[in-house]
Amino acid sequence: MAVEHTTAIFVAELILLLFFGRLIGEGMTRIGQPAIFGQLLAGVLLGPSVFGALLPEVRQVIFPNTPALKSMIDAVSQIGILLLLLLTGMETNLALVNRKRRAVISTSLMGIAIPFACGAALAYALPTELIPNPAARLVTALFLGTALSISSVKIVAMVLMEIGAIRRDLGQLILATAILDDTLAWVIIAVISGIAASGAVSLADVGTSLALTALFLMASLTIGRRAVAYVILWCNDNLRIEMPVISAILVITLSMALTTELIGVHTALGAFMAGMLIGQSPILTEHIEDELRGFIIAFFSPVFFAVAGLGMDLRTLFDPTLLLFTLAIIAVASIGKFLGALVGGKLGGLTGLESLALATGLNARGSTEVIIATIGLSMGALSNQLYTMIVAMAVVTTMIMPPTLRWMMARVPLRDEEAKRLDKEDAEENQAVPKMERALVLADDSANGQWATTLAGVFAGRQRVLTTVLEPPRADAAVTTPPAKDRLINAIRSALEDGQPAAPPDAPAAPKLPAEQFVQTRVLTAEDGLEKEVAKGYSIAFVGIEEPISSQAPKFQDQLQRLVSTFDGPTAILVNGNRAFSNVGKPLDILVPTGGSPEARLATEVALALAGGSRGTLTVLHVFDPNDDTMLLRGRARRLGLSLLVDARRLGKRSGVSVKGLTETNSQPDTEIRRAARRGRHDLVVIGTSLRTGNTRFLSARSVALIEALRSPVLLIAR
């Protein structure tokens, strides 16, 4: 076959797999089933079961059994496996596993052990013609046992989201157990692959595989965690090419997959671990993650699952004996997993209803089983008939799980602690501060600069966000640590030690991290250095310079003007810092006026973080305008103001911060703000304001007048 014809046929295969995979996946989604089922079904329709049976000659032209074409489509499929495992790893929440570790560990181990043993035993009852290599039946038994015992974390997560149970305690427990299941699955597959590669069971080989796997996991979770975070951060901050972080993620994933292959275990473990480490990167923004996910889901996922469907031959199930074995595989997988998870849940301290719901939720297979079966087929451990049976089991168990889990979850009562947690999460969903990942600090050695760096440190320590300090170039090369960095580190250290919110009773203690881990410095050397730094992706900027507002108010000082003109996020600007803030451990008494605007809401959130990080207090002031509270409005303005104070108190209670509500009535709110600041002798006033936009961005005249009238240090949250 000519090369150009090979390329043309390869492209035609991709077109068919993508088109029908996405089309039928859309149909499955509309009826409430996972899209991967549609992609699998597309492969089945294009395979020997339908397309091959109806138009065998045409199918032979499009899907010929030539080594070149098979290797080309297989290469795309294998890359698809690695990238799907990358996504699975990125969704793995180790903190979730750790929080309910007793129930998670017992359920996962029992839920794997019982169906694994049953599946391995079933493999020895299969006819010899179903075993690709009767001399290596043990390898087939190990693959079959693994495929029957693992829950698919992607399918479990999707079903929990569809039925609205993902945020419930039991839903999180089901997801955490599935996460541990997936993690153990790739360790087991790595060991089995080593056995399959050696062709015989050798205690020395098994021991070597386990030792190398353990060494790889330990290195990944220690040195690897920091190395991956550093590489992603460095690429994001230093490379100017498009999508540098995504390129770095792909290189990391393939490198770790290659590492596991070189040590004699499967590439799946390396890709999965890479996803876990990448998912914990401090700057993996939702935007970057969405772009990476879209690239994988749009191309590699439908191709992989459709290729997996191509390997299924449903005519296998027309044989009554093979159909009975298929039903036996489904029964063993379902009953074994259900009993194992049920016993594990009871051992983990769950109630009977909770254990039943947990066992029901874990009885979903899907993508993980398809990947395991594909690996087994490619290694010669599974025959085409066994492969078809395993994929059929994955489809049937996953289709049964959603309605049964929905029925069970409706009968598990909501605990008081769970209700409080859900209420807190609902509130945080609409907050901006908990979603912030990086902070930028632009400060000099003035009183404003000292205040700004200290407040940025309190904020960073409270929220645990990576913070970058911008320094002017220094002529003296002997100067080491800059004062701004010292103040920032000291404030972060204080907030980390004393300013963290109380953890749930069943949660393990948060790890003590060094304050230096949250700080990095940048030297501004070029004229456009500030603009380049801002473009690296920051959630908030803290600014402390001697005269932030120029003499031509309401414009800013030149450097600050450049920052607010290019930065899309909120800028916290310190003004009126007439004295240096030197007592880092001092609790802050903060006043924040609130008027219901998005800027005022953000200012309240920032003030709460600062009060919490310094173990301080917060006073929220709302000024009623009597002109708004007329008979025509029937008190709506006053009710709105009171609801804002109640909301601030709720946020404070959830954050562990004492919040005092203060109300005044005046048609000129700025007058009452000045009075409250004078009477309360507050350490800091936090004010939210929106910037006006013209030829440049600038403050309103009202904001400038209020700042000039206030004597207290003011943190202006401008956006």
Image (spheres, grey):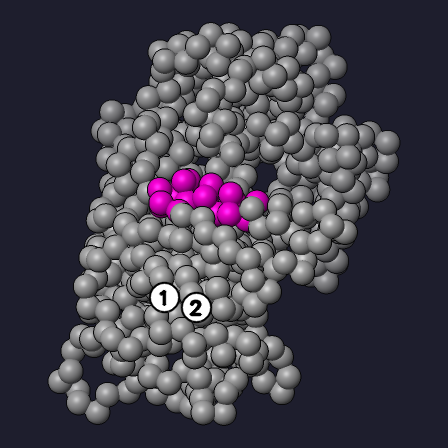
Q: Position of residue 313 (x, y in %)?
A: 70, 26
Tag 2 secondary structure: helix
Tag 1 secondary structure: helix
> Is 269 on the left-hand or right-hand side of 246?
left
Residue at the spot 47% in from the left edge and 56% down from the top edge = 621
> Is 413 on the left-hand or right-hand side of 494?
right
Quarter of the picture holding the N terminus: bottom right
**Depth order, front residue of 661/96:** 661
Question: Dominant secondary structure of the magenta stretch?
Answer: helix
Q: Is residue 196 magenta?
A: no
Mark 1 → mark 2, Cα distance in angstroms: 6 Å
**Numbered circle sitting on residue 678:** 1
Quarter of the picture holding the C terminus: bottom right
> Is 160 on the left-hand or right-hand side of 29?
left
Q: Is residue 655 magenta?
A: yes
Q: Position of residue 252 (x, y in %)?
A: 41, 56
- 87 up-or-down from 693: above or below: above
Mark 1 is surrounded, within 10 Å at the Cα level, by few (under 14), some (14 to 19) or many (20 or more) other residues, namely: few
Range shown magenta: 643-659
The amino acid sitting under disc 1 is: Arg
Residue at the spot 31% in from the left edge and 63% down from the top edge = 681
Rendered image quadrant of residue 579: bottom left
Q: Which residue is mark 2?
A: 674
The amino acid sitting under disc 2 is: Arg
Q: Position of residue 344 (x, y in %)?
A: 39, 13
**Numbered circle sitting on residue 713:** none
Q: Do the numbered discs 1 and 2 sit on residues whose CB atoms are within 8 Å?
A: yes
From this viewpoint, which residue is outermost toward the left?
A: 478
- 557 up-or-down from 30: above or below: below
Mark 2 is surrounded, within 10 Å at the Cα level, by few (under 14), some (14 to 19) or many (20 or more) other residues, namely: some
- 558 up-or-down from 296: above or below: below
